[in-house]
Amino acid sequence: MWDSPDYRVYEHDGDVITDLRPVYWSYDPGEGSLPRPPVSIGLAVEDQESGMLLGRTEVRIGWEEYGTAVMVDPCLAAPSPP
């Protein structure tokens, strides 16, 4: 993540909880010649006040030649609770 006022990059391992700020991900450029493992990206949206789960989705990404990212599984969306 990076944001004002200092726009520093903060590295996170595992789960990240944030507000409206975007989260970016990348691989270490020093490992560019190594095969990249598949990636799972999940998003859960909770009501800030109650903590109630409003919805969630997940996408899995794999890799083709030349490091091209491809979606392995379609987005899996869970319906919002009643």
Image (tube, rainbow, N blue to C red):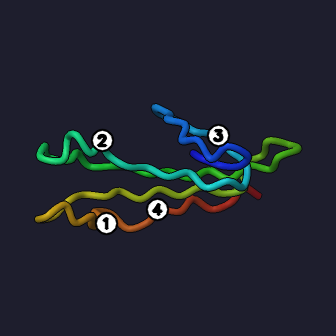
Q: Mark 4 points at which residue?
A: 76
Quadrant into which the N terminus falls? top right
Q: Name the residue under label 2.
A: 28
Element type where label 2 sits in the image? loop
- Pointer 3: residues within 10 angstroms few (<14), some, or many (20+)? few
Sequence-first tag of 1 and 2: 2
- Pointer 2: residues within 10 angstroms few (<14), some, or many (20+)? few
Of the two numbered discs 2 and 4 in the rendering, the one whose residue sits closer to the viewer: 2
At a point 62% along the width and 50% down the height, the residue shown is 44
At a point 22% along the width and 40% down the height, the residue shown is 30
Residue 17 circle label: 3
Sequence-first tag of 4 and 3: 3
Element type where label 4 sits in the image? strand
Looking at the image, residue 61 sits to the left or right of residue 21; the answer is left
CA gap between label 1 and label 3 equals 24 Å
CA gap between label 1 and label 2 equals 21 Å
At a point 58% along the width and 41% down the height, the residue shown is 8
CA gap between label 2 and label 4 equals 28 Å
Could you say where residue 80 lies in the image, as x and y percent from the top left?
A: 69, 59
Q: Quadrant of residue 20?
A: bottom right
Amino acid type of the residue tagged 3 in the rendering: Ile
Element type where label 1 sits in the image? strand
Residue toward you, 22 or 62:
22
At a point 46% along the width and 31% down the height, the residue shown is 13
Given contact means CB atoms under 8 Å apart, are the residues at marks 4 and 3 in contact? no
Given contact means CB atoms under 8 Å apart, are the residues at marks 2 and 3 in contact? no
Could you say where residue 54 lies in the image, as x and y percent from the top left?
A: 72, 55
Amino acid type of the residue tagged 2 in the rendering: Asp
Q: Mark 1 points at which residue?
A: 71
Quadrant into which the C terminus falls? bottom right
Looking at the image, residue 57 sits to the left or right of residue 41; the answer is right
Sequence-first tag of 2 and 4: 2
